[in-house]
Amino acid sequence: MASRLLRTFRKSVSLASAAALVALTAACSSPVTDGQQGGPVEIRFSWWGNAGRAELTTKAIAEFEAANPDIKVKPEFGDISGYFDKLATQVAANDAPDVITLGGAYPAEYANRGALLDLSKVEGQLDLSQLDQGALENGQVQGTQYGVSTGANALAIVVNPKVFEAAGVPLPHDGTWSWDDFAQTAADITAKSLKGTYGTATVLTHDSLDAFARQRGEALYTQDGELGLGKETVQEYFDFSLKLSETGAAPNASETVEKLNVSTEQTLMGMGQAGMMLTWSNSLTALSKASGAELQLMKLPGETPQAGIWLQSSQFYTISARSKHTEAAAKLVNFLVNNEAAAKIIQSDRGVPSNPAMRTAIQDLLTPQGKVEAGYIDGIGKMEFAPTFIGPTGSTAVSEITARINADVLFKRLTPEKAAEQWLNESKAAIGK
């Protein structure tokens, strides 16, 4: 989590309908800058996440307000399941928060529709010179800086050793295991565990499809914004998803779909009822707290001979193009990524910090789980992997398409072959390629 916990499947219908309104409002008037108004200002800051993230962020905001008494920050947060729909409505109504947390392809979606501020316009208040170059580039859309990385993140297999031990199944070696090894291990755990406990809580998502493709020398998107994978890869992906369900390695179709948009605490891993879960590395702390277990991180199966993994910014801080207080908003973003007080509060909740100085500042404060996350990212950073390209406009719809068609496969309304054909047709239509 985004880093939120699961990269859940986001609806884009409301975002698409907002596009025209965004263009209209952008054309009708110009935002008022801080310099045009005297006295204190109030800015709104939106993010998604659980109660723990809200508590940490509220503490960081209090530190910022103490250092900037003329700026009041109004927090707006909620669960990821409704976050992006609410944001689309706000943008359409010209009522977007000043500082907006985004993830995945959303920075490109909103930037291409004129809803985000070109951050070069507030460079006096926002210093990005200390960020890792890769993290900096992750926030760019066609060379323009629209987002600021909150921290690094990577796909991982979260493992609960207690579940393995109870089932009498040995932990796998993540340097050599294949997807077939993963499926067999998961099936063995389910077969040897109490009813309701599964080998994997894995929900194969848009992001895991990308990794699946990259391991085959393809990619979800090309640099030109087109689909970069073929029918065979997509079909193999749906075949594997169905295999996990049919063998009992994962829950059945009904329970899998039911668990798509639940909180951390309600996931099978969070409830201590799963041996493994494919998710993002910065989920470890929240999942460990929810489960009460010392969870571990392992690399994805199938990473040899070709790596499918990549380092991704967990989330991005962006500023609304319609904000009336862009300088104040930029000061808040600058504080969140460059200030030691903020770093020591937030630590790795939004990914391992992209500013090396902040990583150093928090090293001794990290929980055991936080140190595991940081160590995992360090290890991934030493690997050689192909570049990744931000999804084109319309690509957020592909996430929903993947989830819906995967559900159809699990419920056997579509064969993997037909599902692959439908996925390609709908995804091409969504991105207009």
Image: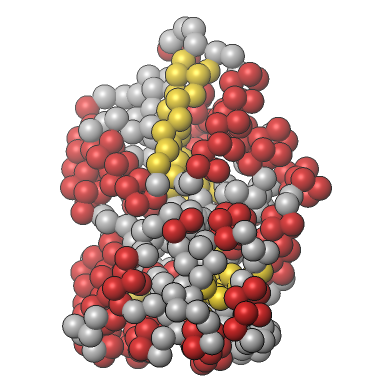
In front of the other: 306 or 5: 5
Q: How many marks?
A: 0
Q: Position of residue 334 (x, y in %)?
A: 60, 34
Left or right of 347 on screen, residue 283 = left
Residue 312 visible in the snapshot: no
In front of the other: 28 or 77: 77
In front of the other: 40 or 66: 66
Q: Position of residue 125 (x, y in %)?
A: 58, 28
Q: Report the residue at 49% width, 88% height from top.
A: 191
Viewport quadrant of the C terminus: bottom left
Q: Position of residue 28 (x, y in %)?
A: 22, 27
The part of the image, by quadrant, that contains residue 423 is bottom left
The part of the image, by quadrant, that contains residue 165 is bottom right
Q: Position of residue 207 (x, y in %)?
A: 44, 69
Residue 220 vertical placement versus 3 (above, below): below
Residue 409 visible in the snapshot: yes
Q: Report the residue at 28% width, 47% height from top.
A: 85
The part of the image, by quadrant, that contains residue 10 is bottom left
Q: Report the residue at 67% width, 45% height from top.
A: 347
Q: Report the residue at 26% width, 24% height from top.
A: 29
Residue 207 vertical placement versus 13 (above, below): below
Residue 249 vertical placement versus 71 (above, below): below
